[in-house]
Amino acid sequence: MITFLSGGTGTPKLIWGMRTLQDDTEIAVVVNTAEDIWMSGNHISPDIDTLIYLFTGILDTTTWWGIRDDTFSTHGALRSLGYQEILSVGDLDRATHIIRGELLRMGERLTTSTKILCQRYGVTSQILPMTDIPVETMVTTNTGDMHFQDFWVKHQGMVPITGIHRKFPALPVTTPEVRSILKDSKAVIIGPSNPVTSIMPILECPGVREELIGRPVIACSPFIGMKPVSGPAGVLMKAWGKEPSSRGTFELYQDLRPVFIQDIRDEVEVAGSYRFDTLMKNQETSRELAGHILEIINNG
Ligand code: GDP
Ligand code: FO1
């Protein structure tokens, strides 16, 4: 078993290629849930949904969220009735959120709800939420704190931020399922996801770091130079007091002693890192990167 720690874009892009080299049943993913949000009575778990759709083959790989060729009739109808949703949710995507919301309201764990959804979609990889406790990444602005989705989607990242913190009703301990999969894994891959909003929320769950210490961990940087390949990782790293680079990323993971991968174009030096083309423009480039990672895992 190879296990990924994943957000909703950088790591799913890598899994896209890995799936062509490794059977889905040999892949597990521990997923960030700190971007989850209840909306219109339903439960959206953007990163879990991206992985379910990736493994089902229906993901929109232009945006890396939602279902390819989905329609937005309900979202449009709500808007014309004066009800504005923060996220543009597709009609088919909404079905997933309705089922998950219903299961959670009935008292199911997020882990079980995800397993049920995976079975119904026919996903054979294990997709495991990092915890069953609700966690929210909050950003601090001059006018107060806001949910990450408000910052990034509603305000399009245009609000100055001065800090990041996580909000939870109880300590977000990880699950027995996550602990068990990490124990059973030949290697754990920290994909090139956003360190602040995707990877650190997973590593902060009590139990995850403890399982990872001493295991083979491979981490890939989402930065090239002082800029992320896409998204808000740069401003978030700065607001968190970290360098927005591969060096800053490595420092966050270094207690795990990972094999570290940087892009061949990255002018920031992290001593001892491997250099590959990490720009996954299509499934073929993703497959090449995944191949290099498998070689490291198999040959040490
Ligand atoms: P989110 O949940 O949608 O924010 O997605 P992730 O956290 O999983 O991934 C976002 C990160 O992926 C960003 O910081 C990007 O820099 C990184 N990323 C996206 N595409 C690529 C790529 O092709 N190569 C690398 N190295 N990083 C990428
Ligand atoms: N991201 C957007 O920027 N705009 C959207 O309208 C949007 C809708 C959406 C619907 C379902 C879903 O699972 C994800 C969606 N996302 C959208 C992406 C999501 O909010 C991501 O968590 C963040 O964009 C970055 O991490």
Image (cartoon, rainbow, N blue to C red):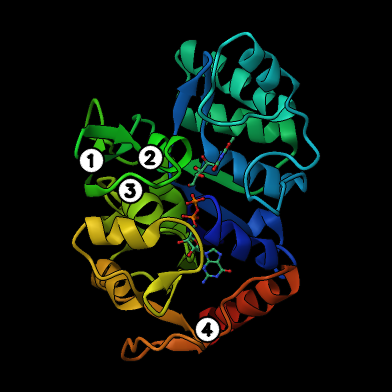
Dot 2: element: helix
Task: Tell me where residue 49 sits by quadrant.
Answer: top right
Q: Which residue is the site of mark 4?
A: 296
The answer to whether the beta carbon of the residue marked 2 is less than 8 Å from any atom of ligand 2 is: no
Q: Is residue 300 visible?
A: no
Residue 194: image location, x then y, percent: 41, 58
Determine the secondary structure under disc 3.
helix
In the rendered structure, the answer to whether residue 41 lies left or right of residue 242 reads: right
Q: Confirm or deny contact between disc 2 and disc 1 (CB under 8 A).
A: yes
Which comes sooner in the sequence, label 4 or label 2? 2
Kind of residue at disc 2: Phe
User: CA separation, marks 4 and 2?
Assistant: 38 Å
Rounded to the nearest angstrom, the CA distance separating label 4 from label 1 is 42 Å
Residue shown at the point (28%, 36%) measured from the top left: 172
On-image quarter of the N terminus: bottom right
Element type where label 4 sits in the image: helix
Circle 3 packing at 10 Å, graded few (<14), some (14-19), many (20+), is many
Q: Amino acid at mark 3?
A: Pro
Which of disc 1 and disc 4 is earlier in sequence? 1
- Distance, label 2 to label 1, CA atoms, is 9 Å
Q: Which of labels 3 and 4 is toward the front?
A: 3
Mark 1, Cα crowd under 10 Å, few <14 / some 14-19 / many 20+, is some
Q: Which residue is mark 3?
A: 201
Q: Which residue is mark 2?
A: 151
Residue 113 shown left or right of residue 259 in the figure: right
